């Protein structure tokens, strides 16, 4: 039996027989789990019994140091409070939806005199009619284009009705607007058209198609063939939109279908949206660490998180499974939020059960695909690093890999780049640049020596100063040098000269992608299709890219560099005033000291500095005046 301590044992013994919420806390006072219970005494005590728990619950219990309870009158109050507490504390062991996407809706506000069809991301209680959600912007655009192709909706944002009629825009001329701004239609006629729009958005395509076909036949009979062709194209657009919908054998009410699939570690919840008897899309949500829980518990937890912020709560929610009595509680909670009737059910047979099985199939497929992607990613990163370490003869996994490259233009503006990969993934915050200071010309060997010497000297200094989290404190397990055996030898010598035993290092010769180890007579050649060589190439290419970018910045600065910037005490404002006063560098070089002193913003000392610079550029020139600052003797 676990000894929870006198204080905690006392709190456990005093738990009441009441509905409410409980907050589990760790030693630091952080809320790590929020739960609700019909009977707090029975529910909370179950955590502290020495019985079998799921892996997630067992891990949570190991961190519990204290707990608090909040009493409620009813189970519904407890459910609502639980949602608010989870939203507030974001506990680590609760189901938390990380996906903050807001799917688009179409909105029509009938309170406006001449309503428009608008795109929005959230539903509000403003009396407007909302349609959706639509899965992705492309689906919304398709619906909007189809609606506007059939119904002459206004698209402008003008305040209507206007104080004075205006000239109608081109949309009226091409038959895509009724021009209420010009007073060419009244609210009754526009409202009748809007009823057709709303019926269409609710899925009543048949009525629209029948009307369009009738108009097309009338136009053809009247030999208005151009108009008949336009109506034919509209019918084709509507039928195309119908074909993109997946028809289901359900009633015409709104339905969400929810199911879950688990792999023992994680869970994947799938939700399918059915509107007007047609499936309009779906989405899946990955729930890490929830794979060991019961499917019903997962779905119940998901629903409270999902519908807490959902813009549209459907009339019916069909679930794969739910805990006992959870359907009734969730139903009451959803009714409270929607302000209308909501039914939550777990169908066991019939068409609705088949629909839930379809959602479960989608959840299983999404989980398998996610795991497959994760497996591929693992193979390309951590797995590739492990294989590379074994090929290079390392006795441990190379967690941190650093890559180095030198960039210059004919020896000018030479820079070295250091890129870092941790667990096979770029860690861009760890990247560093080095301006080469001690090397003249294009000498990659000496440049690599200087770079590694400076990098490790900084690391040694930080460790001496006790800066464990310094910029260079984390040393690499593996170093890649862009180049062959000679570049590698110079880089390695830099560490030896500092008295440091070098980590595993290798050079990558670019021409044949050969890997050179220190002192090796022959290189290692890897298959170009292996993840380990591809990892090496990514490190090398990233070092090259990072170095080139910095080199280009320095080169651009050099091209725009002004000679006046080399004069001490002459900043941007004084440079601007000098060029404004004299017009060019040549005129500044030919100016006398007294002229320079008269320049706005110049002090005697600054003018003296510019005059001295001009004399140097002019090859000496006349003697400096006796009253110049440079000629004064200082005590």
Image (cartoon, grey):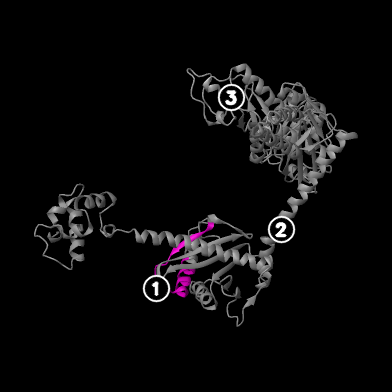
Rounded to the nearest angstrom, the CA distance separating label 3 from label 2 is: 56 Å
Q: Which mark is residue 451?
A: none
Residue picked out by circle 1: 441
Can residue 430 be spotted in the picture?
Answer: yes
Question: Residue farthest to the left?
Answer: 626
In the picture of the structure, the residue carrying the numbered disc 3 is 178
Decide which of tag 3 and tag 2 comes sooner along the chain. Answer: 3
Q: Are marks 1 and 2 in contact (CB under 8 Å)?
A: no
Q: Which residue is mark 2?
A: 376
Q: In the rendering, at what x and y percent does residue 434 appear?
A: 45, 63
Find numbered disc 2 in the image and state the secondary structure of the residue it sits on. Answer: helix
Which class describes the residues within 10 Å of circle 1: few (<14), some (14-19), or many (20+)?
few
The answer to whether one can see residue 123 in this image is: no
Quarter where residue 237 is shown: top right
Residue toward you, 170 or 522: 170
Residue 509 vs 262, above or below: the answer is: below
Q: Is residue 8 magenta?
A: no
Q: Which residues are magenta?
A: 430-454
């Amino acid at each position: 039996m676990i000894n929870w301590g006198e204080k905690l044992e006392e709190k456990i013994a005093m738990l009441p027989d009441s509905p409410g919420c409980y907050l589990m806390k760790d030693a630091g006072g952080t809320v790590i789990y929020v739960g609700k219970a019909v009977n707090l005494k029975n529910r909370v005590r179950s955590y502290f019994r020495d019985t079998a728990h799921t892996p997630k619950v067992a891990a949570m219990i190991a961190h519990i140091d204290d707990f608090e309870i909040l009493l409620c009158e009813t189970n519904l109050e407890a459910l609502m409070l639980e949602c608010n507490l989870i939203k507030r504390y974001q506990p680590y062991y609760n189901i938390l939806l990380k996906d903050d996407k807001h799917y688009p809706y179409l909105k029509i506000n009938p309170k406006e005199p001449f309503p428009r069809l608008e795109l929005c991301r959230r539903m509000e209680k403003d009396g407007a009619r909302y349609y959706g959600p639509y899965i992705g912007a492309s689906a919304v655009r398709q619906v909007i284009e189809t609606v506007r192709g059939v119904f002459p909706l206004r698209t402008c944002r003008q305040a209507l009705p206007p104080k004075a009629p205006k000239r109608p825009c081109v949309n009226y001329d091409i038959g895509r607007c009724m021009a209420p701004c010009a007073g060419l239609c009244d609210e009754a006629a526009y409202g009748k058209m809007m009823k057709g729009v709303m019926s269409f958005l609710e899925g009543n395509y048949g009525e629209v198609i029948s009307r369009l076909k009738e108009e097309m036949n009338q136009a053809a009979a009247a030999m208005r063939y151009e108009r008949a062709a336009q109506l034919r194209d509209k019918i084709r657009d509507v039928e195309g939109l119908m074909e993109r919908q997946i028809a289901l054998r359900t009633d015409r009410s709104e339905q969400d279908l929810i199911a879950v699939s688990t792999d023992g570690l994680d869970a994947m919840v799938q939700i399918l949206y059915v509107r007007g008897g047609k499936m309009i899309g779906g989405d899946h949500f990955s729930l890490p660490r929830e794979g060991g829980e019961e499917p019903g518990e997962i779905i119940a937890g998901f629903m409270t998180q999902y519908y807490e912020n959902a813009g549209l709560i459907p009339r019916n929610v069909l679930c794969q499974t739910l805990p006992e009595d959870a359907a009734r509680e969730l139903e009451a909670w959803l009714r409270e939020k929607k302000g209308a009737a909501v039914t939550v059910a777990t169908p066991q047979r019939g068409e609705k059960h088949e629909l839930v099985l379809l959602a479960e199939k989608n959840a299983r497929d999404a989980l398998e695909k996610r795991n497959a992607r994760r497996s591929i990613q693992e193979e390309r990163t951590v797995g590739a690093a492990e294989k590379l370490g074994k090929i290079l003869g390392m006795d441990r996994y190379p967690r941190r890999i650093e890559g180095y490259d030198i960039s210059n233009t004919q020896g000018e503006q030479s820079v070295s780049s250091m890129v870092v990969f941790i667990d096979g993934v770029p860690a861009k915050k760890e990247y560093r640049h080095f301006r080469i200071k001690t090397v003249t010309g294009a000498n990659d060997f000496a440049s690599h020596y200087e770079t590694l010497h400076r990098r490790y000297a900084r690391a040694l200094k930080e460790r001496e100063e006790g800066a464990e989290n310094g910029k260079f404190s984390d040393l690499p397990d593996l170093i890649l040098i862009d180049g062959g055996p000679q570049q590698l030898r110079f880089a390695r010598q830099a560490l030896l000269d500092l008295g440091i035993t070098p980590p595993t290092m290798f050079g990558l010769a670019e021409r044949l992608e050969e890997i050179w180890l220190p002192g090796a007579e022959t290189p290692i050649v890897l298959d170009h299709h292996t993840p380990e060589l591809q990892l090496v190439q990514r490190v090398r290419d990233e070092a090259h890219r990072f170095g080139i970018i910095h080199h280009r910045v320095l080169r651009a600065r050099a091209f725009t560099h002004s000679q006046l910037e080399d004069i001490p005490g002459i900043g941007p404002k004084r440079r601007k005033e000098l060029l404004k006063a004299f017009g060019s560098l040549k005129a500044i070089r030919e100016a006398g000291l007294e002229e320079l002193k008269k320049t706005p913003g110049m002090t005697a000392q600054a003018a003296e500095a510019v005059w001295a610079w001009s004399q140097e550029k002019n090859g000496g020139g006349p003697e400096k005046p006796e009253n110049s600052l440079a000629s004064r003797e200082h005590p």
